[in-house]
Amino acid sequence: MNIVVLVKQVPDTYSERKLSDADSTLDRDSADAVLDEINEKAVEQALQIKEAGEGEVTVVCVGPDRATDAIRKALSMGADKAVHVCDDALHGSDVLATAKVIAAAIGKGDAPDLVLAGNEATDGGGGAIPAILSELLGLPQLTHAREVSIEGQTVKATRETDEGLTYLEANLPAIVSVAEKINEPRYPSFKGIMAAKKKPVDTFTVADLGVDAGEVGLGNAWSAVTEAAPKPPRAAGQKAEDEGDGGTKIAEYLVTQKLI
Amino acid sequence: MRLSEEQRALRDTTTEFAAEHLAPHAVEWDQTKHFPVEVLRKAAQLGLGGLYLPEKFGGAALGRWDGTLVFEALAGGCPSIAAYVSIHNMVATMIDQFGDEAQRHRYLPGMSTMDSPGSYCLTEPDAGSDAGALSTRARREGEHYVLDGFKQFISGAGHSEVYVVFARTGGPGPHGISAFILDRDTPGLSFGPNEHKMGWNAQPTRQVILDSARVPAAALLGTENGGFGIAMSALDGGRLNIGACSLGGAEAALGMAVRHLSERSAFGARLSQAQALQFRLADMRTDLEAARSLLWRAATALDQDAEEATHLSAMAKRICTDTGFEVANQALQLHGGYGYLAEYGLEKIVRDLRVHQILEGTNEIMRVIISRRMLAEAA
C-alpha cells in the first residue's frame, strides 16, 4: 500500500503566534516551528496501517526551508521518504493554490492508494485542503475521521460530529482526513531519529512541478487576510463570598446559567 | 562543542517524554515508593532499554555523548528513574560486551524492551569503595556454580529479571573475581526488604541474598577471574550518566527557581529584581554549564576510546554530582519555605541528587582515580 501523508510545519501552539505587519501572512520568525500535532496523528495512522500489512509511507510538505525540521520529525517517527515543495513564490498562497501544488507533488510519485491529512491545521485553520485535493485528484474523501481501517480495497472511517457518529466507506484510492481523537502519536524512537537523515527527501520548486507561478503566492490568492486582532484577555470571573453558604451560592449561580 | 541535529532531536524527544510521562508523577512516586515498571517499558519504546546495544538486539546503538544528553533530559522529569535506567543500561552493555552469543541472544532483546530490567550487583555490606575485597563466593560444582553471600544497595532488586553478580572464584583481591548472570528465579536467590532511603524512592533498593544460589556454568560472564575488569568497564559510562542525571535534576530545580523569583514579590518588588539573587542565578547557570562542558568532553573521550577517558569520566562525575546537588540545594533555598514542601518537588530533587555524590564510586574515590594517575605520572 502506497500511503501519502500531508504534513505542515506550524508555529507551536505554546508560543505566541502572530501575523506579520507587512502583509498579514504568518510571522514565522516570531514562534517556534513544529510539525502540526494533527499531522503527527496522520503520520501515526499511516504507520499503523503500514505495520498492519505492508507498504510505504511518503510525507508531502509545502513550506519554507526550515520545514525540513517538520519533515525530519515525520521521518524519525517512521515514514519512509518525503517530498518537500519549497519555493519563495509560494509565500502567502491560499488553500486553492496550496492544494494545486500538493496535487502536483503527489503526481510526481507513484499513484497513492491512500492520502492521509489532518482535518485542519492549527495555524490557518482553513480545513479545506483535503476537500479541494479530493476534487483535483478525483478521489473520494472521508473527512474528520476518528477511526480508520482498511479492509481489502475499501477504506472505512468513523466521523464524529456534534450530532453523532457517521460510518463512512470508500473504495481505494481515497483521501482521509483525521480528527483529534484518531490516536496518540508515537514518540520518534532513537533509532528512528538516527535513521531519519538517511531517508530520501525530494525537493521541488513550483516550476519543477509544472505549476504556473501566476497561480500561487500572496498576489494570486483568491482571498486575503485584511486584519488580525489578538484575542482579548479573559475577563475576571464572578466572585462569591463564602459566609457558610458558599455551596448554595455556587449552585444558585449555576442555575442562573442553566447549567444545573 | 555543537550538538548535531540528531543529538538535538534525541534530547528534545526525551525531554518531551519526561515532561509527559515522568514529571507529573515524580512526587507521587517518591511519596508512595512506586517503581513505575510500565513507564519504563514505554521509555523502552524510544530506545531507553538498550541505548548502547546493537540494533540486532533491539538497541539504539547510541554513543556516550548521545547518552549524556538523553539522561540529562530524562532526569529533568525524575532523577531517580533516569538513574535506574542508567544502571539497567550498564548491565545490558556488560552482557553485550562480555557475553557470548548465547548470552547476548538470551538476555539483550528483553532488556531492550525493558521486559527484563537489570540490576548491577557489586557492592557488599562490608565492601563498597573497596570492591576488590568483596567476599561473596562462587564455587564450581560440576556443571554449576554455587554462589553464597550478600549484595548491598542493589537498585531494582526484587523487580529486576537479570542480575549481574560479582563473586570470588579465586584468591584475594581484584584478580580473583568473576561475573555471573543470574535470573530472578534462580534457586537460592532472594531479596531483603525495600530499604528506607533519603531519596531515590521511585526505585527499590534491596539486599540481594545468595544462599547456595545455583547457576549453570554457562551463567559465567566473560572469563573466570576476569570479573573485576567487567565491573569497572561499566563504570566509566555509568559515571557519565549519573553526572548527566545530576545536571538534569539541577536544571529542573533551577528552572523552578527562576520562575519563582519572577513571580514572587517581597518588600515591594519582585524577588528577581534583587541583584543578590540575580547573581546567584547567574552563578548557578555558570556552574552547570561548566560541569556540562567537562561531561561532554569526557563522554567524547569515551566515544573515541581515548586513553584519558577514565580519569576524565571520574572528574566529570565528581563535578556534575557536586554541582548538581549544590544548584538544586540553592534552588530550594531560593524558594524559601515552599522549597521545603514536598508538593513543590524541589526537596525531592535535592534528596535524589544527594546520593549521586556517593554511588557509582563515591566522589572521594573519583579523587583517588584522578590523583593516582597524576602521582604515577610524576613518579
Image (cartoon, rainbow, N blue to C red):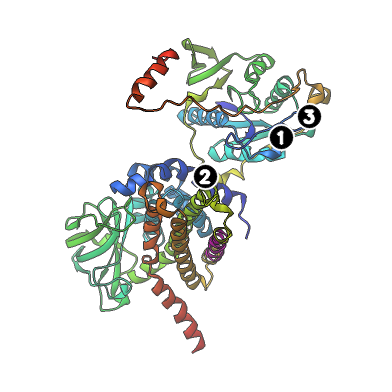
Say left or right for B322 vs B280. left
Residue position marked by numbered label 2 in the rendering: B13
Q: Are marks 2 and 1 in contact (CB under 8 Å)?
A: no
Q: Is residue B296 magenta?
A: yes
Would residue A41 be visible to someone looking at this image?
yes
Residue position marked by numbered label 3 in the rendering: A23
For label 2, the SS is helix
> Mark 1, chain letter?
A
Image quadrant containing the N terminus of chain A: top right
Residues beneath discs 1 and 3 located on the same chain: yes
> Mark 3, chain letter?
A
Magenta range is: B280-297
Residue position marked by numbered label 1 in the rendering: A27
For label 1, the SS is loop
Instruction: Judge whether A120 appears above or below A77 on screen.
Output: above
Quarter where residue A56 is shown: top right
- Closer to viewer: mark 2 or mark 1: 1
In depth, the one of A131 and B368 nearer the eye is B368
Is the magenta region chiefly helix, strand or loop?
helix
Name the kind of residue labelled 3 in the image. Asp
Label 2: how many residues lie within 10 Å, few (<14), some (14-19) or many (20+)? many
Q: Could you tell me how far apart the alpha carbons at marks 2 and 1 are, in whole angstroms?
A: 26 Å
Q: Could you tell me how far apart the alpha carbons at marks 3 and 2 are, in whole angstroms?
A: 35 Å
